[in-house]
Image (cartoon, rainbow, N blue to C red):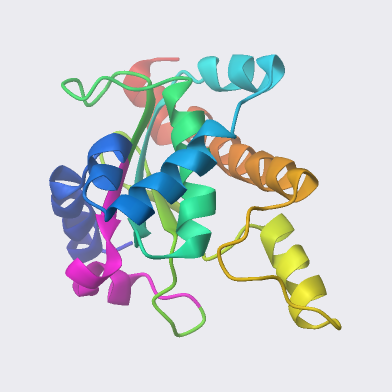
Amino acid sequence: MDMVQASLLRSKFAFALGYERYVSGGTPDQVSRWGGNYARIALSPEQDDLVRSFTRRVNVLVISGLWCGDCAQQCPMMARIAQANAAPVDDERAAGIDLRFLDRDEHPDLAEAFKICGGTRVPTAISMAEDFEFVSMLGDKTLSRLRAKAAASLGPACPLPGADLPEDEARATLADWLNEFERVHLLLRLSPRLRQKHQD
């Protein structure tokens, strides 16, 4: 990650919105769809304990679109994970997850900088350290969503756009996102640079 991209991430993160403010900017139909999906998601006690155990700050910037069906299904999952260990906004070094959202079409420079397979995919979650050093990017769909999409799109039937996720697929997708958040946290927790900085 070069200095230009690190600077871009920091400036975009400062401009980005928390989950509730981001969703509230949608149409009534979008707010209802995102809200319905959010209401169906819950972390298990074990998943909640895992997220609460994070001792590093994880800044996550999501390139999204309120109109996007995949975003409406996956972004509420990210929000549930982040809310289990929300980082205070006013202390950049405090542990926890600071999750923020930007609209892809309103920030084409960011979307262009983080293309996936040549396209500006949404949702794309960009994970950063407390000082906004790039750590990881996961975008478009998690592995479980890609498997389900391949099974449906490459098979004899195609699901209706915007349909609710089947329960087993929703659980698997939530687990995929949780694994990504844990992976990023462990990268940060084991980082020699951050261990030296925090003396741990």
Measured as percent of width and height from the top left, residue 139 is found at: 50, 62
Count of number-bearing discs: 0
Give the residue at x 18% y 65%.
4
Measured as percent of width and height from the top left, residue 129 is found at: 35, 38
Measured as percent of width and height from the top left, residue 54 is found at: 50, 20
Quarter holding residue 186 = top right
Quarter holding residue 65 = bottom left
Give the residue at x 34% y 58%.
66
Q: Residue furthest front?
A: 28
Image position of 138 with respect to 158: above or below? above
Foreground of the two, 142 or 131: 142
> Horizontal placement of 157 versus 22: left or right?
right
| Extent of the magenta region | 100-116
> Horizontal placement of 27 versus 52: left or right?
left
Foreground of the two, 89 or 164: 164
Q: Is residue 158 visible?
A: yes
Give the residue at x 48% y 20%.
84
Q: Is residue 111 magenta?
A: yes
Image position of 166 with respect to 200: above or below? below
Measured as percent of width and height from the top left, residue 78 is found at: 49, 40
Q: Is residue 199 magenta?
A: no
Locate the N terminus and report the quarter of the image it occupies: bottom left
Image position of 82 with respect to 72: above or below? above
Foreground of the two, 143 or 191: 143
Q: Is residue 107 visible?
A: no
